[in-house]
Amino acid sequence: MKIAICDDREDDRGALKALLEAYGQDFEIKEYGSGKSLCGDMDYVRECGIIFLDINMGGMDGLEAARQIKAECPKVHIVLVTAYVNYALDGYKVKASRFLLKDDLEQTLYECMDDILREIRQEERVVEFGFVEGNMRLRVDDIIYIETSKHKNVFYTKDQTYSIYKKMDELEEDLKGMGFVRIHQSFLINMKYIDRISSYVMVLTTGKEISVPKSRYPEVKRQYTLFKGAE
């Protein structure tokens, strides 16, 4: 993973880099001494998973740099780092993932990294299947549900559908642990897209309603409750 550190103080950049290197992951880390130099290297920024930005810098400060970066790279995780706690609210305005105080980095950085890397892994989960339409790689979060139709199973995604000659039992196993729930023989649902479950009916965020058999209802409710609690 590529990481950028932007701070106009060389010693602060070095201290943060040392902590990241000690974290135990294989990172490519590039340092920048100003917001202007960071935003001037957008080719690298676009490939970054995480950017650490000092707020208080001469010229373009960290908040302005964050705004420009988020406008072009909305999915990048920005961590604002500063010596002043009163800047914390400004972090929300630029959609920063985290806000860290320089004096507390040794105590807070690793927990911050754990949380962000977990989020990145969630965002990047990809599965590959041999569909009727050909081999396709799909982001797990883009699959809304899978439905049995005649002798095929159909993947419904945000953009289109894909058909596959594979048993639902096998698909359920392939997607195990990825947030899907089997509500009966013909449906495997991505719980991210469940709006509500009540009176034996599941309503998806798309508006689709699916009946849940009484025999499966308690287990489906239990799995959905656990999923919501883990988010």
Image (tube, rainbow, N blue to C red):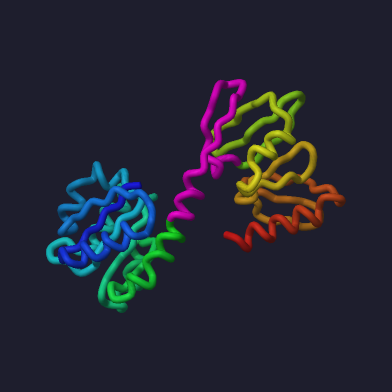
As rendered, which of 227 and 201 lies closer to the eye? Answer: 227
Residue for point 31% across, 63% down: 19
Residue for point 68% across, 44% down: 189
Answer whether residue 59 is magenta in the image. no
Quadrant in which residue 199 is drawn: bottom right
Residue for point 64% across, 57% down: 227
**Which residue is the extreme one toward the right?**
215
Q: Which residues are magenta?
A: 117-143
Q: Quadrant of the C terminus?
A: bottom right
As rendered, which of 113 and 148 lies closer to the eye? Answer: 113
**Which residue is the extreme one toward the left?**
59
Query: In x, y percent, where is residue 160?
Result: 56, 32
Quadrant in which residue 83 is drawn: bottom left
Q: Is residue 83 above or below residue 212?
A: below
Residue for point 60% across, 30% down: 161
Query: In x, y percent, where is residue 174?
Result: 64, 37
Query: In x, y percent, where is residue 98?
Result: 38, 65
